[in-house]
Image (cartoon, helix red, strand yellow):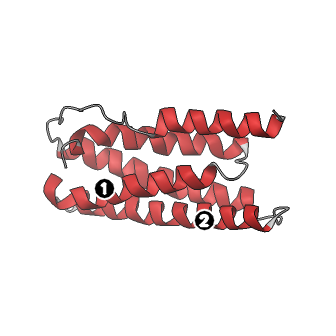
Amino acid sequence: MSARARYRGALAGALALVLAPAAGLAQPVAKWNPERIAGYAQQLAKAGMELETAARKALLPGPPPTVSQQRARYEFLEALRLFENSAHHLAEELKAGKGREATAPTFRRLQTLRRDVEDSSQRMEIPDSLLAAMLKAGELMLRLAPYYADV
C-alpha cells in the first residue's frame, strides 16, 4: 500500500470518527438552551468560513495532476461553500429567536452537507493545514447534534 493510500485511509477514518455522529445509536434529545445553541451555531458559522477560506488558499494555487482529482477538488470546495452558507443561515435563524422545529431543516441540511464534504475529501489529498479546520467544524456539529436528535 502506498504512502498516499495510507494517508487517505487514515484521513477518512479520522474524519468518520470525528465528524460523523454515532450512526444507529439513539441519542437523547438535549434540553433546548437557546443561548448555548446560538453560541454553537455562531462558532460553526465562523469555523465554516475559516474552513472554506483555508481550503481555497490551500487547494487553488495549482492544478491537480488529473481531471478526476480536479473534479474532486471542485466538488469539495462547492460542498464547503454550501456548508458555510447553511451554517450562517442556522446562526441567523437562532439569533432571531427561532426554535428547534423552525431550525431543524437547516440543521438536517448541514448534516447532509457535512457528509458531502467528507465524501469528496476521500477522493482527494487533503493538506494537513485543512485538517484542524475540518475537525473544528465537525466538533461543533457534534455539539449541536443532541439538540436535534429526534428531528
Question: Which disc is residue 108 wearing?
Answer: 1
Residue drawn 74% across and 64% down?
68
In the rendered structure, the answer to whether residue 113 lies left or right of residue 63 reads: left
- As drawn, which residue projects farthest toward the front? 1
Image height of 124 relative to 30, above or below? below
Mark 1 in CB contact with mark 2 (< 8 angstroms): no
Dot 1 falls on a residue whose secondary structure is helix
For disc 2, the marked residue is 75
Q: Nearer the viewer, residue 35 or 99?
A: 99
Percent from the top left, x then y, of residue 35? 22, 45
Dot 2 falls on a residue whose secondary structure is helix
Percent from the top left, x then y, of residue 8? 70, 40
Q: Amino acid at mark 1?
A: Arg
Note whether residue 68 is visible: yes
In the rendered structure, the answer to whether residue 4 lies left or right of residue 117 reads: right
Percent from the top left, x then y, of residue 119? 55, 52
Q: Amino acid at mark 2?
A: Glu
**How many residues crowd mark 2 within 10 Å: few (<14), some (14–19), many (20+)?**
some
Image height of 59 relative to 130, above or below? below
Q: In terms of sequence position, does the residue under pointer 1 or pointer 2 come before the other? A: 2
Residue drawn 18% across and 35% down?
30
Can you tell which quarter of the image residue 36 is in? Answer: top left
**How many residues crowd mark 1 within 10 Å: few (<14), some (14–19), many (20+)?**
some
Note whether residue 91 is visible: no
